[in-house]
Amino acid sequence: MQKTYSALIIAGLVLLPSLIFAQFNNNTTSPFSRFGLGDLHGLSHGRTVAMGGATLGSRNSQQINFANPASYTSTDSLAFLFEFGVNAKFSSYKSSLDKFSANDINFRYFSLSFPISKNISTAMGLTPYSDVGYDVRINQDLPGSGAVSHLYYGEGSLSRAFIGVGVSPFRNISVGANLYYFFGSLTRNAYISFPENAEMYTIERTDGIRLRDFGLNFGLQATVPIDKEQSVTIGATLENKPKFTAFSSDVAYKTLIISIPNQNPRSDRENLIDLTEEKSKIVMPLSTGLGVSYVKNNKLEINADYYFQQWSEASFLGSPYVFLTDRSIVAVGGEYIPDKFSIRSYASRMAYRAGINFENSYLLSNNQQVKDFGITFGVGLPVYRSNSTINVSAELGRRGSTKSNLIRENYMKLNLSVNLYDFWFVKRRFD
């Protein structure tokens, strides 16, 4: 037992700085992250990523399901859970003009959960919300000006550090809430130059936003037993238009390089915009989710989710964002374990998972809503003589389209999560 405690503590001390560093130093390359708050992350982590991301109704004693805080009460009354995840994404992008590829690898999240009493459990952790990372170059010829070079690039991450509580006031009913701290910064830059015309100014602009504030989301789960082995759970979540403090900056200037015979070139710079750290508010969308989960104990789990965010009503620094629309996600997936308690066959104890998801994203490009479709599959690998699990999954998907001068992304995601499970609240009779 003491060795397990030490291993968990060491893992936390090693991973926590890396995960926090990863939140501020994202490794992301996606032209879709240019607008809004960037690329939004999914709700699911760990085992349910391989199940299409369907997680809102799931209750599993060996899973930390922070998408629905009502699920925390499913944790065994003597258990301590610690989980962390890493993912990699391999993408190829294509438009009517060009194509390119990008690869990203990141630490993604960590979380831990343990019971407070028989009917109350808690969880806490750090999870990403969105990433910005793009580098777009456009060259064109303008009459009277010659060649013009446009460069657009951005970076940054938004994250949530959360602590949540789940309570079971009645049998088969659970409610919960997450209190989270929303933080991070996003920076977007634009650079316009005229490489063949020395008499033209170059123009540079940096637009940044820094967020920090607290928010709440809520969850509910109700389980209907069918018999001793089977049950159906209905889950629901709500986050009602949280308002976050934001500090915005917008700096733009133009520069002309003047050549002087027999002297070093001199630059003539003029500020166009000079706005730094102006305090304002961002009103996030109303977010609701509904999930259903069918479970046959130690054998089968089938989940289905519908999630909705009203981004068309969101407000950025006092005004709506014209490139955003309502986001909706449908996800379906399942898990099958041939024989969880098999002594002779490790393959029979493994959990086999698969699923699909479809998303109408919150992005509008050329008045077209960007859509995303993915197929997921993976396995849960039980650790010998333990309830701990190593989860491995992959997702193959397509986002966007080459129609109407848009961009299409074909991608593959690889996910690895480690769930460490131990009994921490057992009174020993013998030492």
Image (cartoon, rainbow, N blue to C red):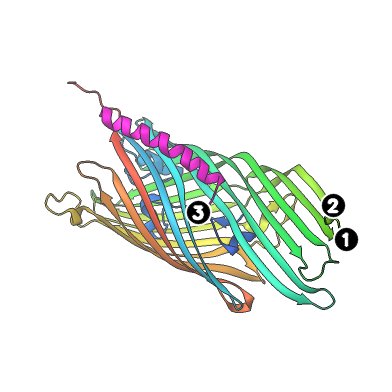
Q: Are marks 1 and 2 in contact (CB under 8 Å)?
A: no
**1 or 3: tag closer to the N-terminus:** 1
Q: Residues within 10 Å of mark 1 (few under 14, many from 20)?
A: few
Q: Amino acid at mark 3?
A: Gly
Foreground mark, 2 or 3? 2
**1 or 2: tag closer to the N-terminus:** 1
Mark 2, secondary structure of its residue: strand
Question: Image point 54% across, 68% down: which residue?
Answer: 371
Q: CA distance from mark 1 to mark 3?
A: 68 Å
Q: Which mark is residue 289?
A: 3
Q: Residues within 10 Å of mark 2 (few under 14, many from 20)?
A: few
Q: Residues within 10 Å of mark 3 (few under 14, many from 20)?
A: many
Residue for badge 2: 271
Q: CA distance from mark 2 to mark 3?
A: 47 Å
Residue for badge 1: 261
Mark 1, secondary structure of its residue: loop
Q: Which residue occupies the foreground of this view, 382 or 67?
A: 382
**2 or 3: tag closer to the N-terminus:** 2
Image coords of residue 287 (percent x, y): 56, 52
Q: Amino acid at mark 1?
A: Pro
Residue that sits furthest to the front in the current view: 262
Query: Is 22 on the left-hand or right-hand side of 363?
Result: left
Q: Amino acid at mark 2?
A: Asn
What stretch of residues is rendered in magenta?
Answer: 1-26
Image coords of residue 4 (percent x, y): 28, 32
Image coords of residue 123 (percent x, y): 43, 37
Foreground mark, 1 or 2? 1
